[in-house]
Amino acid sequence: MAQLENIEVIEKRLWGSADNLRANSNYASNEYFMPVMGLIFLRHAYSRYLAVKPEIEASLPSRGGVTRPLTKEDFSSKGAIFLQEKAQFDTLVNLTEADDRAQAIIDAMEIIEADYETLRGVLPKSEYQELDNDVLGNLLRTFNDPALKKATGDIFGRIYEYFLTQFANQSAHDGGEFFTPVSLVQMIVNFIEPDHGSVIDPACGSGGMFVQSAHFIEKMHKNPQDVATFYGAEKNPTTIRLAKMNLAVHGLEGKIQKAISYYEDPHDFLGKADFVMANPPFNVDDVDAEKIKSDPRLPFGLPGVNKKGSVSNGNYLWISYFYSYLNDEGRAGFVMSSQASSAGGQEAEVRRKLVESGHVGAMVAIRSNFFYTRSVPCELWFFNKKKAEHMQDKVLMLDARNVYTKITRKIYDFSPEQLANLTSIVWLYRGQNERFLELVGSYLDRTLVEAKASKEQMGSFVAGLDGLVGMIPEVDEETKSAFEFLGQDINAFENSIDAEAKAWEAAAKDNAGLKATAEKLEPLAETSRDLIKQIDQLYKFVEKKAKESGEKGMNRPIKELDEKRKETVEQLKLIRYFFKQVHWLQEHFPDAELCDVEGLVKLVDIEEIKANDWSLTPGRYVGVAPEIEAEGFDFEETLRDIHIELKGLNEEASTLAAQIQKNFEELGI
């Protein structure tokens, strides 16, 4: 999650530098978009190149002491792009004022295009000739940001979206189109598992669906280029260039064509796709009904048409298209406006036919604030044309609106664990109970791994605390006693860790065995929270005494101890965090089988859907989740903090009262 937490800082820094081009070039804002994105492309491509290069070099064959040179195939198999030296970002950053930076960048782009046919004519080149040498130097240094060097995932697509919303030119960014949050793309990928064949996105934007599909395939230790082919359609030429650049950065190639998908099927994919994934523009209302009235991609007929002869809302056009693209075993997952699942009129009629087909697999409600540039809620739709026979007349309704992590004031997301937990519900729905149990087992194992790791951290903190206490001339009995109790509690905690770790090795990994282990680990998880309170409390007491002592040289050891305290606390938090994942799964699905959970999930049959006007809105079926006290608030900890602060204020008040009394006496009052 750290990347998401830092992304705003990275973006604003990049935007600040890019925006300087407005004052230092002849370009309008809509013209310097591509040269800026070109540099981000080079930066991210180089980061991925460096990340996989050592592993590739270690595996290169050699003959007669000579190792064969690196090839682009080596990097493609690792999800990266091969870069010759002149195309490497460090080469460009290290250019001097005497060098022609524009020409060097153009040369880098041409070298890459020569190596990758799919990029020919795509990368920006001549645009750099309009920029001053020093301006380019500043841009290169800015884009060499350490945070950007370490960024992973679809960072390119994310920054692309941010820049689109900042640039004055909105022609490449319609009101209903916006970057799909990575976690939502990952959820779609996890649900439909696009591991082979043709993967199509008819509204592909920057290509994020393809990137995440490739990552999924890579986790299966397969080369995405060997097992899957990516097909995309996008109406905006600039966005197509960006999508091809994004794919290339990840060592991928895709067949992306310019098309308006409302009217065109450039890949002729009717009934041929293994997988369809998309985040289409929401609520478009100006599609010409006359042009599409006989389109074979509308098996359920046209949705509502208004007096102007336009489709009233394009949502059901997309839904129908996605369905029609699938072959007889195909699966689809896509983002859709939350309005669509309960829309009335002719849209409801299309939805009825869709539900009656038996191919609607699942519906997932997502709360607002997940989209980076929009606060709208949405829903994820899932089709499966090879649904199990006994599930043909049922739809899985999953309301995930109460599952989220608040990253910033404006951005919510799923943590990796929340995403895995929601995915495990789909495993249970498919009868893949063993995958659910493996996830529970992985959390139990991780709980103990983090517990073992905490031993070293606690030892370091106690040693630092002991050193600081030794520097204080007089230590009160209360602090000594608290220090002694902490040592005893840590010792008991570590003994418990060793005992439970040994028991876990021999424990049964079936549902009964996992539940028994969880019951035994619960006290360990709770103790980790208690130790955090003790450590924080004792640190505050000792810090105060150290400062009051008046001894010189206290600031540095206090600061060092505080760093150790923070590291120890964060490590201890992980123990309870991973145990809470176990608790969440076992509390909701105690038998490791799918069941209805109030406010979360329900398997709904077609008769109930029919009785609810064919609505596919999950919240209409799952009910309301019971209120749970916010996990972040701890009454005891808050009260303890207040007590410590009050004690300090009382001591200060006593000191001030004594000083005032002394002043009065000196004045003879």
Image (tube, rainbow, N blue to C red):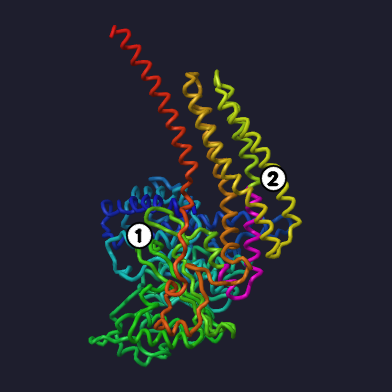
Instruction: Specify the amino acid type for callout 2.
Output: Ser
- In terms of sequence position, does the residue under pointer 2 or pointer 1 come before the other? 1
- Look at discs 2 and 1 and give the one toward the viewer: 2
Give how far across and how far down residue 5 sits, in percent.
44, 52
Give the secondary structure at mark 2.
helix
Q: Are marks 2 and 1 in contact (CB under 8 Å)?
A: no
Rendered location of residue 515, percent (x, y): 66, 60
Name the residue at the left extreme: 307
List x then y, in percent, for residue 374: 35, 64
> Tag 1: residue type?
Phe
Drawn side of residue 455 relative to residue 616, left or right: right
Identify which residue, 413 or 43, lies in the foreground: 413
Label 1: few (<14), some or many (≥20) within 10 Å? many
Residue 229's disc number: none
Q: Is residue 124 visible?
A: no
Q: Tell me which segment is drawn in magenta.
A: 424-450
**Number of other residues with Cα within 10 Å of mark 2, as a class: few under 14, some 14 to 19, many 20 or more:** some
Q: Toward the viewer: 557 or 197?
A: 557
- Magenta segment includes 509: no
The image quadrant that residue 491 belongs to is top right
| Residue 257 in view | yes
- Any magenta on residue 437? yes
Residue positioned 36% across, 72% down in the render: 237
Q: Is residue 44 toward the left or the right of residue 55 in the image?
A: left
Separation of marks 2 and 1 at Cα, in angstroms: 52 Å
Q: Which mark is residue 496?
A: 2
Number of numbered discs: 2
Which quadrant would the C terminus be assigned to in this image? top left
Report the residue marked by disc 1: 163
Q: Quadrant of the rendered structure where residue 307 is?
A: bottom left
